[in-house]
Amino acid sequence: MKKLNALVIGATGATGRELVNLLINDEDFDQVSIFVRKAPKLEHEKLKIHVIDFKKTEKNKDLIKGDVLFSALGTTKKDAGGKKEQYLVDYTFQHEFAKIAAINGVENYSLVSSTGANAKSSFFYPKTKGALEEAVKKLSFRKIDIFQPPMLIRQPDLMRAGEKSGIKILNKLNKIGILKSQKPLAVEALAEKMLKVAKTPSKEKVSTYLPKDLLL
């Protein structure tokens, strides 16, 4: 079996961290290329770290070559500094990177989206996520896997106060049989599912995984 080259954006985020850790320890991959704004303190013989300006991704197009692109980039309005800045991260940067990857012959694309993503939504966040989903579906990847996870249980150093409260509330509701389909999911579990799906052949060009598909 041919050894694979993975490309990862969002590699320093909650899900991205777990993905990179799984990929560098996976025998099916012999190279893991991550594209980041700031290099993480991580070294491995398989790992290639590319520090880039996502506003100028085109300048790095010759580096965006491989077999599978994992897109786990994302932010919040607060962290980004406003809706305009959040849109850049949650839509523009990912779409531009995916376009170049598709043009360069990357066959498989794996995207972390969000539950409720809908391009027709009247709310900014799900609308942005839905718009990205619709845009990447039009690109020439052979296989596209879209993950719409429920609230994620991030690493302790990345967990936001609001997320902690939300997870506690959902867990209490789940215990009495309410909103079981929205049971919080550990980022480790999401990353494991993404990797498994990426290595599984499919006749479908686009597959979307809802919370219920990820909680099995």
Image (spheres, rainbow, N blue to C red):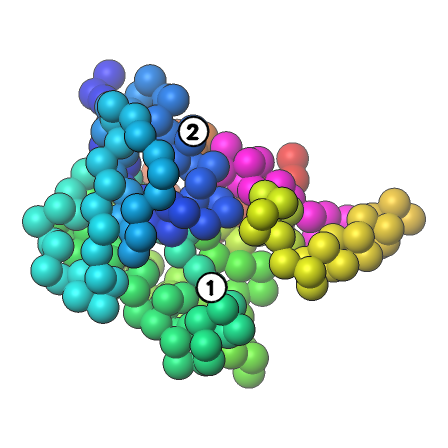
Q: Amino acid at mark 2?
A: Leu
* 29 left or right of 134 in image: left
Query: 204 and 37: which one is in front?
Result: 37
Which of the 4 image quadrants contains residue 179? bottom right
Q: Secondary structure at mark 1?
A: loop
Extent of the magenta region: 179-194
Gap between marks 2 and 1 measured at Cα: 22 Å
Q: Is residue 127 visible?
A: no
x, y percent for residue 180: 77, 49
| Residue labelled with disc 1 | 75
Does 196 appear above or below 138?
A: above
x, y percent for residue 122: 55, 83
Q: Main secondary structure of the magenta part?
A: helix
Please name the residue shown 28% across and 43% down the image: 34
In the rendering, which numbered label is found on residue 22? 2
Q: Quadrant of the C terminus?
A: top right
